[in-house]
Amino acid sequence: MEQLVTSDFKLGIIAGGQLGKMLVLAASNWDVKTYVLDTEVHCPASTCCTTFVKGNQLEYDDVIKFGAMVDLITFEIENVNIKALQKLKSEGKKIFPDPDALAIIQDKGLQKEFYKENNIPSPQFNLFPSKSSLITAINTGEISFPFVQKLRMGGYDGKGVVIIKSSTELEKLLDGPSLVEKLVDIQKEISVIVARNHHGEMKCFPVVEMEFNDANMVETLICPSSLDAKITEQATKIATDIIASFKLCGLLAVELFVDKNNVVWVNEIAPRPHNSGHHTIESTITSQYEQLLRAIFDFPLGSTQVKMPSVMINLLGEPGYEGKVKYEGLTDCMGIEGVKIHLYGKKITNPFRKMGHVTVLGNSLEEAKKKASIVKQKLKVKSW
């Protein structure tokens, strides 16, 4: 597909958040024209893409019209109008990852059934059409405490997920079709990002460890993982098994649990660039964004070798601040060797909104952690 990378080739990216922005920047290195579809004129990718198209990725007509403008479509968000993508695919439009795989991944219930059918280790689950049917199952003893409830559609960044530990917490139950799974006794939460091209070549980025804040959002990411090699090998095999089972071309982020018995379980997956791969821009030979482009253009996949140990910190809006964004501590943090700051360009902050990230590099993981601790103390996202 070498003819794809020309100054006339138009890559369509559905949604223009921070992931879209970083994908656009990677594509610009290859002189690829990028078209971005988003509802927000001032979305992060709007400042660097070749052409911005205002439209809603959930609206059938908007997606169809956007598809007619470009040569190939990818996306940075799962919440897309599937019928429109499938229609474009039937007309010969190249779309990667495949919309049929996306249709399964969008629905966490179908996701879980896919794992079961393909012998992918995932916590035991039950599906419920409504909150009332779940309550009935609890009352009859079909479901026991503690458990995790996840809405089948639309959840992200910890939204659409609740942990119920006892009958006193039933007011927290979410309304809508959902799945309930056994609560895993978690030792660590980890992530593997795997890429696959059209020829079936697959490569995984090194396993990373994730630490979460009180809002159930990733706050810190550590690469490489300190887990035993047997565990990281198991996690990598699970990731490659999933992407191969889907026959998916592109990028797949696989979030996993390691339980107290060192057993690895799949939590969720995302067929796109992912928050747990931001550090790859500086810390590995090939970034996740370049790897996605290599996969969908059917080029050889790039090396995922770690150049330096790293800690990635999400820059989240501080609690109690809402309005025009103001960053505090930038100058101090810029003076620390190995600190790479990425600001997404969002004009308005609110509590826990993702406003940027920082990758901290060190000669050792301990050195990177010490620097990251300083950055976390000094760098704050507030408002005027």
Image (cartoon, helix red, strand yellow):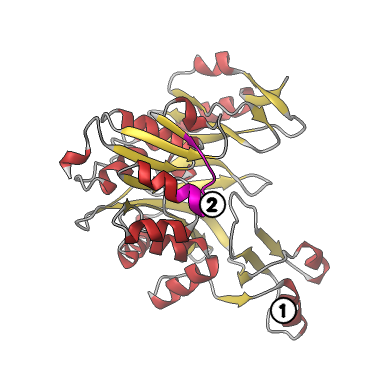
The image position of residue 103, as x and y in percent, is: 46, 63
Question: Secondary structure under badge 2?
Answer: loop
Number of other residues with Cα within 10 Å of mark 1, as a class: few under 14, some 14 to 19, many 20 or more:
some
Q: Write the residue at 54% across / 52% down.
A: 58
Look at the picture and state if 50 lies above or below 55: above
- Highlighted range, magenta: 53-63
The quarter of the picture where the C terminus appears is top right
Look at the picture and state if 192 lies above or below 220: below
Q: Write the residue at 74% across / 65% down.
A: 173
State left or right for residue 363 relative to residue 314. Answer: left
* Residue 226 visible, this angle: no
**Residue, disc 2:** 59
Tell us which disc is closer to us: 1 or 2.
2
- Give the CA separation, mark 1 to mark 2: 31 Å
How many numbered discs sit on the rendered protein? 2
The quarter of the picture where the N terminus appears is top left
Q: Is residue 136 magenta?
A: no
Question: Secondary structure under badge 1?
Answer: helix
Which badge, 1 or 2, comes first in the chain's sequence? 2
- Whether the residues at callouts 1 and 2 have beta carbons within 8 Å, the answer is no
Q: Which mark is residue 133?
A: 1
State left or right for residue 341 relative to residue 12. Answer: right
Mark 2: which amino acid?
A: Glu
Would you identify the image quadrant in which residue 21 lies? top left
